[in-house]
Image (cartoon, helix red, strand yellow):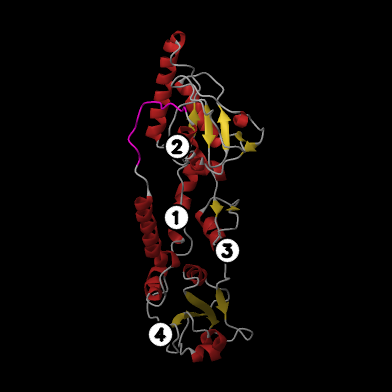
Amino acid sequence: MCGHCKAMAPEYKKAAEKLKGLVKVVAIDCDSHQQLCGQYGFPTVRLFQSNKKSSPLDYQGPRTAKAFIKYAVSQLPATHLTSVSAKKPLQTFLDSKDLGRALLVSSKSSIPPLLKSLSLEYKDRLSFALVKESDSESVKTLNVAKAPALVLFPKESDEAVAYNGELKYAELKKFLDKYAPEKLEKRSEGKSKSKKESKTESKKETETPQEPFDPSIPAVTTQAELQSLCTEKPGICIVSFLGDEEDESIQAELKKSLTVLSAVKKAQYEKKSHKTMLPGLIAINGRKKAYRPFRGAFDEASINSFLKDMLTKGPNFEFKFEPQLDDKPAQGAMKTESSPAVEPTGEPVVQKAAEEL
């Protein structure tokens, strides 16, 4: 912890204790949360307003408990409560019965910070109003003998309930919770869980079981095999051109290449990112009509890097034809004949997400 932080810590902690129930005060350990601190800068004090769309305010005042408290309280909005006056009469406030109505009778000239904080805490669950003690008519209507006092009218009721406890946050919250509906996130939590569980179950029912891993590299010698093993399957299909297996002069190289492809296939299978056939060299997305030729060293690391780039970077090329093989089967297990349909068009295809490839 830096020297400035060490000096400020006791004052900040003291302010947090005094502001309890009014403003939420937190501290972040930037050694453990470097990314978050890097976003907002440190050491610094920022105030996040109740309106989540507003940018945080950068506090530039003295690093003392008194200054912290004064600043935080000054930023509490009064937009969620009513100040009863000639323009905003008491009866108008009481006639709105869709929510419970809490009224604080106060002798103070300004709106108490605690009332502002409560109006934020119970936003859209209770309505709050301030009645000045000098408004004798309203005070008489509420049957209040002395300020400060809190009176609450439950939802759709004209019967007042007088609060007799201490005017402190914890005690007031216990009282108000009896007349306020649960917070929206709590009410919807059960529904969200049910929907999530339902989606999970539905996904489990519709998921196709993953095929057991087959290390062999299938040969593509006909149009039907090309479609069934490659273009009609979801995900990436890799087509590798390795030469004629009957050519004795390339047997060693062919065996080496097949070993590389098998290792790549296993690595991709274990990542569960591609559950389709995986030889190498041309990556094809049959549904999106997109492909990308592999250019690089024919080894496991290079091919895995190629696949990663295809998923995240591009560019990939569009083909507007159905890939075709000659009617005459190619000679050799891994040798294929390609038509001009796979020539690059030069038109990049941008993927929306890697899993859609």
Q: Secondary structure at mark 2?
A: helix
Q: Which circle marks residue 74 in the picture? A: 3
Which residue reaches farthest right?
346
Q: Earlier in the sequence, mark 4 or mark 1?
A: 1
Depth-wise, is mark 2 or mark 4 nearer the camera? 2
Q: Is residue 41 visible?
A: no
How far apart are labels 3 and 4 at the CA level?
31 Å
How far apart are labels 2 and 4 at the CA level?
74 Å
Residue under pointer 4: 161
**Residue 77 lies in the magenta-colored region:** no
What range of the chain is rendered magenta? 210-221
User: Residue 311 versus residue 255: which sits nearer the camera?
Assistant: 255
How far apart are labels 1 and 2 at the CA level?
70 Å
Mark 1, residues whose alpha carbon is within 10 Å: few (<14), some, or many (≥20)? some
Q: Are the residues at dot 4 and dot 1 in contact (C-beta closer than 8 Å)? A: no
- The x, y position of residue 3, in whole percent, is 50, 39
Depth-wise, is mark 3 or mark 4 nearer the camera? 4
Residue under pointer 2: 228
> In this rendering, is residue 348 above or below 187?
above
Q: Secondary structure at mark 4?
A: strand
Depth-wise, is mark 2 or mark 3 nearer the camera? 2
Residue type at mark 3 is Ser
Mark 4, residues whose alpha carbon is within 10 Å: few (<14), some, or many (≥20)? few
Depth-wise, is mark 1 or mark 2 nearer the camera? 2
Name the residue located 39 percent from the left edge and 63 percent from the top edge.
Answer: 189
Q: Earlier in the sequence, mark 3 or mark 4?
A: 3
Q: Earlier in the sequence, mark 1 or mark 2?
A: 1
